[in-house]
Image (tube, rainbow, N blue to C red):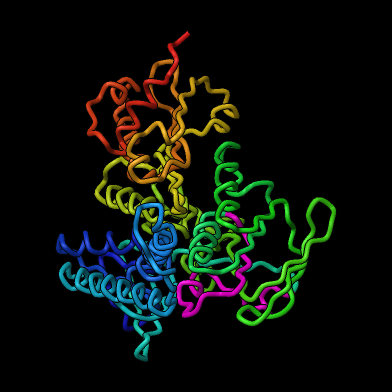
Amino acid sequence: MTGIEDYDLVVLGSGEAGKYLAWTLAAEGKRAAVVERRYVGGSCPNVACLPSKNLIHSAKVASYVRRAHEFGVRADGGTVDMAAVRDRKRAMVAGLIALHEHKFEASGAELVRGHGTFVGPRTVEVTLTAGGTRTLRGAAVVVSTGSRARVDDTPGLRAARPLTHVEALELDRVPDHLVVLGAGYIGLELAQAFRRFGSRVTVLERNPAPISKEDPDVTAAVADLLRDEGIDLFTGATVERVEGESGTSVRIHASRGGSPLAVEGTHLLAAGGRTPNTDGIGLEAAGIEVDSRGHVRVDDRLRTTAANVFAVGDCAGSPYFTHIAFDDFRVVRDAMAGKDRATAGRPVPYCLFTDPELARVGLSEREARDRGIAYRLAKIPMDRVLRTRTLSETRGFMKALIGPDDRILGFTMFGVEAGEVMPVVQVAMAAGLPYTALRDAVLTHPTMAEGLNVLFAAVSAAS
């Protein structure tokens, strides 16, 4: 093969783990290249985490305007300009892309724009966006191609051209009636946001509860939130076929509890999961195997079945979170440096960015029971945390699981600023501290974190 360009590192895809690996090695004087066909920086700054949270915050402001009287403020209704919401999001994304381009330039890592395909061991042929091709070979190669929204084979669904989160974030008008297929993270966050913008919203979920892997008290609290906001939630609903086209008129035919269920709307959002981007990139030519779900097969050092090739993030089957992809970067960075670091046993913090937020780290009660792990439970309603009363945001609860040795096994919070409180507990868990360290800590009043004093004071004495 002629015209091959050799690099110390070639990364296919510019998502979280891959870009940090390239920036880090390039800053050390290594020759690094990142191949990206579309989204510079990956999905998170372009079409996923950050843009969705931008839109969700606009929806929170809309909610505050409608609740203004609660705070002694007069507001005249508050009209949502969806095009302006979209433009605010676009401006943020443009700034993030510029930031990424600067990072590539400053680090010395080369950004190669085009579609990359493996054509041999550690060798990628790039069909350049600007025309032509290049062939790059790396002493080490990293697959960092991420994932995409899954649209399943339900009859009529693909023909209905449903929105995914990507298109939903680009809407320039508020849907009259948005039907959401799936009550997972993406479905719930966007369902609440568009309801607050003024849409009628219906959510169909095949499982018996939203985010059904969580504890029953969590799923019940989330279901109550949706209903209180005027969202129609149908759980245990199996979608059988879809008619019409999203953006005009859609009709969803489903069954629930043995009875037919039909829902009509103007827009349809498919939020039923994600698919790894591992097809069509020639993995077989490089000796890189995938599992039954299409994820690149890796060990706990993120090494693939091909020598000196790693896979990171969503495409490697890591939990689908940007913060986990960033930890994947650290695992591979250390592996390349001959250090011992692995994915096995690492904590996975979760945060659902509804309002209020749901945050969890460590074991849930369901998981502890399934594993036969003994625990003591402490649980308090959020109104015991006095900061919530100053905010008029008393919905939810905190709970923690405590082991026989007084260490914290798990923490769950459904409440305002849950995502900011959870890391405090996570650090205590990582340090192996007993729960009493948080019970007895001097925490600022009035803050949300101060609620940890109250929560851990509710732990019963060990038997």
Position above or below: 232 against 244:
above
Position above or below: 79 against 344:
below
- x, y (%) of residue 233? 65, 55
- Which residue is painted at 62% across and 71% down in the image? 177
Query: How many numbered circles are shown?
Result: 0
Q: Residue furthest bottom?
A: 131
Res 177 seen here: yes
- x, y (%) of residue 88? 34, 74
Return the residue nearer the eye: 189 or 397.
397
- Residue 355: within the magenta? no
- Which residue is painted at 44% across and 22% down in the image? 402
* Left or right, 261 with reference to 110: right
- Residue 162: within the magenta? yes
Return the residue nearer the eye: 93 or 25.
93
> The magenta stretch spans which residues?
156-183
The quarter of the picture where the N terminus appears is bottom left
- Which residue is painted at 42% across and 64% down in the image? 62
* Left or right, 52 with reference to 280: left
Determine which quarter of the picture holds residue 348.
Answer: top left
- x, y (%) of residue 138? 31, 67
Determine which quarter of the picture holds residue 128.
Answer: bottom left
Return the residue nearer the eye: 406 or 183.
183
Q: Residue furthest top?
A: 463
Return the residue nearer the eye: 142 or 431.
431
- x, y (%) of residue 462? 44, 11
Res 289 seen here: no
Position above or below: 233 against 46:
above
Position above or below: 139 against 408:
below
